[in-house]
Structures are given as C-alpha cells and as structure tokens.
Amino acid sequence: MTTTTRRSPALTVTRLVAPTMLWISALYLAIAIAVFTVIAYVELGLGERTDESTSHAELLANSSPRFFLGSLALIVTSTLLAHYLPMGVTRRQLFWAGTTLALGGAAVAAAVIAGLFLVEWFVLDGTGIPITYRTPHLFDGSTQVGTVFLEHFIALAAFMVLGWLIGSVFGRYGGWGGLGLLLPCLLLGLLPEALLGVGWVGQAYDALGIEPLPTAASVPLGIAAVAVMLLLNHRLMRDMPLRRPTS
Amino acid sequence: MFDDRSPIYQQIADKIKNDVLSGELSADTQVMSTNQYAAFYRINPATAAKAFRQLIDEGVLYKRRGIGMFVSGEARPVLLAQRRERFFREVVDVMLAEARVLGISLDDVVRHIETGRGTQK
Amino acid sequence: MTYSIEARDLRLDYRGSPALRGIDFRLAGGGIYGLIGRNGSGKTSLLSLVASLAKPTAGTLLVDGEDPFENPRIMPDVCLVQDRIKDSGDEIWKVGSFLRTAAALRPRWDQEYADRLVDLFELPRRKRISSLSLGKRSALNIIVGLASRAPVTIFDEAYVGLDAPSRYAFYDEVLADYMAHPRTVIMSSHLVEEVDSLFEEVLILDEGRLLVHEDTDDLRSRGVSLTGPAQAVDDLRHGLTVLNEQVLGGTKSITVYGDLDEDALSRARAAGVEAGPVRLQDLFVHLTRKDRR
C-alpha cells in the first residue's frame, strides 16, 4: 500500500484552487489596467491637463476590483463544499482554505494596486506632473507603498469575505432567507471602509462634515469587522450539509 | 451460478466433496484458497471460508499453517461411507415410498432392478 | 485497515420530513456489506451521514468508534462513491486533474492502481468530465473509490451506469482489491441480482427504517418458495410470514419468510410440495412491497 503522508488538507485545497482564481483575476486585472492606461494616455495626450493629473491608479482601485473579487468570492462556500467535502476534507479545513484564499487574494490584489500607484508616480513624476486624488485616503502620496497596500488590503479583504459570507448565507438559508439577510451582510461588509473613511465613503464624510476616526483606531476596527465576517463564515460552514437527493 | 436452495457455501463444500469422491482431488493435494474460490465464483471470501471450515470440521480437509488447505487421507473413505448411507436414505427409501403409493410391490421393484442389472452386464 | 460502523437510534430529517426514523445496527468492519432499499428508502441519507456530508438530526453514529462528523481523522478515510457527480460543477474538470485532486486528498491513494484502472475502464485522461458518457463518469468515480483504498469505501448505486462488461469488471476489482487490502465495503442498490453473492451481510432499508440486518446466507435460507396442492401448502404456512401468494387452479405457490420446520418440510415433500429457493432480489421486493407496509 502506498501511503503518502498527507500535508495539511486546507493548504492542499488552497493550492488546488489558487491557480484558477489567480488566472481569472489576472485576466480581469490585465483588462482593467489596459483600459485605465488608455484613459490616462488619452487624457494626458489630448493635453487637457498638463499642470496636474488625477490619479488613474486611484480611479481603478476605487472601482471594480473589490466588486470583481467580491463576486468571485460568492461561490467559495458552495464550490469548496461541493468539490472537497466528498473528498474527505472537513468543513473547518475548508474554512481555513477559504480564509487563505480570500486574504491571500486580497493581499495579491492590494500589492498589484500599490504597484500601479508606484508606476503611475514614476511615469508622471518623470514628466513633472503632480498627482491628485479624488477621494480621501490613509496615504497622501503614491510612494507610501505600505499604507497604500494596507488601505486596499482591508477594503479588498472586506469585499472578498463579504462575497463569501453572502454565498454562505444563501447556501445555508436558501433563496428567501439569503435575500432577507442580504442587507445586514452588506452593511457589515461596508463597515471596514466606513470605519476607515476612505474612497467614496470618505468623500461622503467630507460632504456631510463628519470627522473620520483616527487611523490608529480605524485600521484595527476595520480589521476586526473583517474578522467578525470570517467568524460568521466559520459558524455557517461548520455544520452545513451538502445537499444531495435522497434515494 | 448457484441457484439451488442450499446456501452457496454448502454448494461449494459439496462440489469439493464430489471432486474428492470422483478422485479428481486425491489425498494430500492442495485445494484452491478461499480467495481463489471467492474470485473464481465471484462470491464473498467469508462465504467460501464457511465451506472450508465445514470441510475441516468433517475431516475432509486439513490445514497446513501458512501454506493452505489439503485433502485429508481419510476423506475419500469417510465420504464414500456417508454417501452410501445417504443413497439408501434419499434414493432407495424415497423410491420405495413412491412404489408403495403406486401399488408396486417390493418384488416387482427387485425384479426390475435385477433385469436392469442383467442388461447392464 | 478496516473500520467498524455503528448506529444507535440514528435519525435524519431532510427538508422537514424524516428520511431516517431511528436506525440501529453494528457492522464489525472488514466485510462487504449490501445495503438494499427502494428509491427514497433512506439509503443515500444513511450513507451521507457516514461520509459526514450531513449531520444526524438525532441519535449516534460511530465510525471506528468516533463521531465521523467534521472528524479530521475519519473523514479522509471514508470514501462515498455515488452514481455520478451531482451538481458539484466537477464536470468542467479534466479526468486527469480530477484524479490528481483525489490523489492529493486521499491519504491512502495508490497511484499505480489508479493508472491500471484508468486503462482497464478505458478512460481518456485529457477529456473533460462533461464530455464523458454516463458509463465513463461512473467508471471515473469507481476508480476514485477503489484507488483511494479508504478503510470505509461506499459504492452508492455506483455501478448502475456501467454496461454489463464493465459491471462485471467492477465486481471482480472490488472483490480482488478487497481481498488484497481488506476494508469495510458497503454496496448500496435496489438492484442486487448480480452482486448479492458478494455480500457478507445484508441490510434492507424501507421508509427510513432498518427492516433486516442479517448474514446473507442466513437471510437467503429464510426465504422459501413452496409450490404444490393448495391444502398441503397451506399446512406449512403456520408461524411463517407469507410474502407472496399465487393460485393456479388447485396449485398454490407461496413465498414464506422465516425458519421453516425441516420435519414439516419433509412431510410436505411427500405430499407433493416442492420447495425452492428465493433470490435475494425477490425477497427484497416482497419484503418492501407497498401493500405490506
């Protein structure tokens, strides 16, 4: 009997799923970067603004990545359970695989975004054009790589875990139950960004005259909100049955 | 393959006994293992093992540890004696009972057998 | 490696209605067990619990002495093979990657054996599962079940999609691999004519209850069909469960279930009654017939 000592099933599942997820995300990011690069060149090339440029890296980062990754994460629970539960992986192990995938995916995407900010700074700073941001951020310069990463990591992780949570809720409570719980889920998922007071939320705060929390409080609280969603996922997954027709 | 009322293991045991009686399996020859029997007849090895256990109990087979099962020396004489007894009980007695129902006298039966013996020779 | 399986008053509600209504049994392990039941009798529900796909509503289930649900030691050692890959999205996978996934997650996987089985069942490794015929899909699942060498291996209607030659190849492989690597094998179906000789013990489920759990030979010997003059046949039926009854003129044929008195049988034979075997499949059909419930 060939007995292979099995490494952690959670890591094995992560390793098996990650390539597919990376492929899809890379394809999406490539398209998004191409689109926003073209927009940037068109704007700059037409000479509309030579004094300053709004950040196109910001434009990209503020928009679709979190929705894209969030919707990708909708199928985490159902896919992992359907594929790997029958292969003898426990739900707890699948939860850890899902956590690794969500946080890992958010980290990779945040790193790419931080890189884009840096590239944009290189290109524009070389021509002497200063960069402005449309919305408030934790950082005030594109070269603050760590802060750029942190802000986007929290925002992206929030959306990925939110997508995953919505998938779990629908998997657990079915269509109507899922719809009923959609709003509380969305509120919880938007909480990290609301706490950070960045992006469009930050803009809204400015308009309403609300003072955002100091970074020292907002970052841990934002991370805590993500952790709460992870915990909910764990509770939802740990005794979820795999629906099969009886015969 | 086995459609008789008696359990499969009984049928396997009977088949081995028949092979011993016909001389196909002589004393001290090794018989197939339970697993070989199971694979050949596509049956559960536990079923085949039951047949062997019965044959060992009856003294038809004996076991050599680690090697396998063999036909015992007294198997054939013992089986012959058993079958002879069974022949009278299950063939002759039943035949005579049937003859009585049909009103055939014992003498007629004996006479028939003797003419049969005559033609056989 | 073999695991025992034990259920005590095991219950499962499925979508608000009971699928299992209190099941008790103990399988010592290391045998081939037949689980027989009509569609909807609760076979798949029971097996889903063994494979931890769902949690019992009430009662106890033990695999190798432990609760299998979310048990990281037991779950990789239980392999449930179903007739096809249902609603899991596995169809987009290629045969090869499906097998590699199983290889990565099943701790006792035998790659050489898997390769041999892929050749035996003539599976195309590079094709997507969705492009395979139903029979080849069944074969793929069966390969995973066999090559996983899981101490508890369950084939749930796993072979109904196979054509006859493949089915016999499957029976031979199950038997050969079971003898070479003893484990607890459960084969579940409502069609058992071809496989009942493989079973050491038989469990019959009916409407969520365990109707029979017996040694296969004992069960088979408890079913007898009696055909002969109506009066003589009726004299035999006392104390026995009559499962089926047919009359043709003065001749009566009944199927009885129970321990038949050998002396009474000898007397009946003399009165012209013929005793015949009842196949396990027929016994099952009679025992679970609707009008008997």
Image (cartoon, coloured by chain):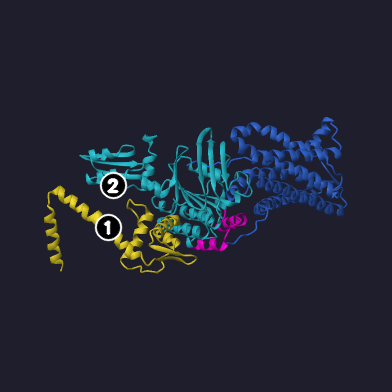
Chain colours: A blue, B yellow, C cyan
Q: Same chain for marks 2 and 1?
A: no
Residue B34 against residue A130 in the figure, above or below: below
Q: Amino acid at mark 1?
A: Glu
In space, the residues marked 2 and 1 are separated at their CA atoms by 23 Å
Instruction: Assign the magenta stretch its main secondary structure.
Output: helix
Helix, strand, or loop for circle 1?
helix
The chain carrying label 1 is: B
Q: Which residue is mark 1?
A: B85
Give percent across and percent down for residue C262: 31, 45
Please tell me whether mark 2 or mark 1 is closer to you in this view: 1
What x and y, as percent, mark residue C97? 59, 57
User: The magenta stretch spans which residues?
Assistant: C93-119
Mark 2 = which residue?
C275
The residue at 78%/39% (across/down) is A224
Residue shown at the point (36%, 69%) measured from the top left: B26
Q: Is residue A166 left or right of residue C185?
A: right
